[in-house]
Image: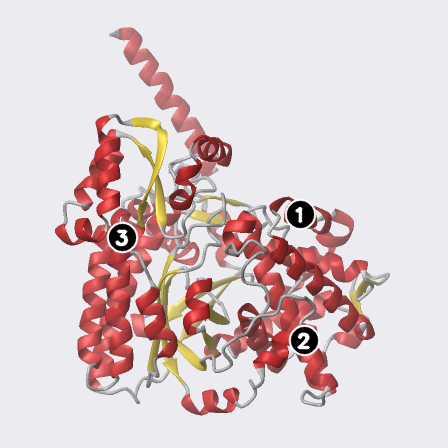
Amino acid sequence: MRRWLRALALLLAAGTLAGQAAGQGSGQPGYWPPEKVAAVLSRTEPIRLAPDLSQLTAGERRAVDALIAAGRVIQDLYEDTLHPEALAVRARLTAGRTGLPAQANRDLLTLYRLFGGPMGTTADGAVEPFAPVSQPGDGRNVYPAGIERTEIDAFLKAHPEDADTLLAERTVVRRATTASLKADRKALADPTLRTLHPAVARQLEVLARRPDPARLYAVPQAVAWAGPLRKVYAHLLEAADALEHDDADFAGYLRNRARDLLTNNYESGDAAWVTGRFRHLNASIGSYESYRDGLYGAKAFPELSLLLADDAATRELRTRIRSLQAVEDALPYDHHKRIREDIPVGVYDIIADFGHARGTNTATILPNNPTHTRRYGRTILLRRNILEDPGLNALELTRWQAAVAAPHAGDLTPAGGFQRTLWHEIGHYLGVDRDRQGRALDVALGEYSDSLEEMKADLVSLFTIGAQAQAGAVTPAGLREAQASGIMRTLLLTEPRRNQPYGRMQLAQFNYFRDRGLIEMDATGRVRVHHERYPATVTAMLREVLALQYEGDQAAAAAFFTKWTAWTPELHQRLATAMRGTQGLRFRLMRYAALGE
């Protein structure tokens, strides 16, 4: 007994010391100290979005309330997908059960709101927990805790028949433990889910006979997140009922999407979303983007974005988008496709964002599924109150002027950013969407698919605006502004991590542009742009990216990024330090009037 007590005391002492080291004198183990919290919050810019909702009908206002209620459930679910201890940390901070002074507790709660969980980014760019929690691993909470890719790769080599479910975008991977199987079988005791997912129910029954932690399996998000998604389902039906007489198309989409969340098949909702003609409201709902998956870039994370349409701005915008087939046919590759030219595009103000959508994303194009895209097209949502936010634009201009030589200081404008963003989103619609074997690009290219797809869209945008300028449809000044936005896109404040697809593709572009002489660093360490080299450089890189996508060769994609993502102290770090030194504020804390913030 004494030996057991002595061992327990040693363990507790070790844990206390480790926690105090992590907390660095905060007064409570594991929490960041006030000075470390202040270093982040002092560099945080609040962005408050408050669109005018006075034009909405009474039914639309009830729908907004119901969709916000659905969004709050999505936000909780999203935070849980990022870290299994997230909601417990938030509850402690909200209730003040941390043992910290009231102000320190409030500041940590602001950090949680800023980062959407207990993992924070320091003022120097390091990612670490600011509360006493475990490191979540690259698999977040959609793979087994702490699992490494090598283990999954080995399992799939032995069980290739499981690859389609384990790497599907809307499944959650488990170990076949007694506890996991019991929880999933309990979810499937619901007669609706059991009817919709009979094969999953049968698989779990078989696995439950011989639980084995080394055995991996996957369940649909509809099963893994059965409780939260049932709540979202109910809120979406409530919103649809409120809209029935004001906007039948939007009500129909919400009903279809509600069912999608239970079936785990988004086709009916995607079809209704893309082909519908909505009045004042729009919403992106579900799991689409996989950037948070640091293991395979495969798993989609939940989101809800509620938007208010600007009809006049949308009508004006649609006049600029014509002859998309001609744009597709001009791209530098040999495997062109027939596309729908009447893709819906709209200008919107954000009412509120939840989950993966929360942040300063300027535009969205969905759905991503190539089959749905072929059958129904895609929808483009330009987020005007982000694109035109004066605070965000001022921060970006400060960063730009710290990075570039004096002749380019005035080139970056919101108008240039708008044009580049518009054609970036259209760029997702164009070019390669399946490899030469007919595989979806996320299947063919794995963790490199997102980086290549985002880079393709960037380059299609610059390629197309350049072609429009040659044809006289874009002024020389407009071209220069869009090209400045393209360079701005590549300027990084920190070295990207391996599991950051955006950062990886931005760094690759910067290095490629520099290699081709489009940009160079002058004697003062500032960027000079040689605009005459823009067309050839963009065309050459776009050709390479389209070829990589068409070939679907992961090894070739890995070699491409290895070649073009070197980061050096004397070049990249020097430039990043200069931008950080003048920019001051780096973090953006989103607030929404519709949420009472």
Q: Who's the residue at 38% across and 45% down the image?
A: 165
Decide which of 442, 362 is in the foreground and name it.
442
- Could you tell whether 328 is left or right of 563 in the image? left
Position in image of residue 205 (x %, y %): 21, 35
Residue 94 percent coordinates (x, y): 28, 52
Which label lies toward us, 1 or 3?
Answer: 1
Residue 344 screen position, x and y as percent: 44, 80
Q: Residues within 10 Å of mark 2 (few under 14, many from 20)?
A: some
242 left or right of 53 in image:
left
Label annotation for residue 330 = 2
| Circle nearer the N terminus (1, 3) | 3
Amino acid beneath label 3: Ala
Mark 3 vs mark 2, foreground winner is 2
Q: How is the image coloured?
A: secondary structure
Picture quadrant where residue 76 is located: bottom left
What residue do we see at 41% from left, 54% from top?
300
- Count up the numbered dots: 3
> Which image quarter holds the N terminus?
top left
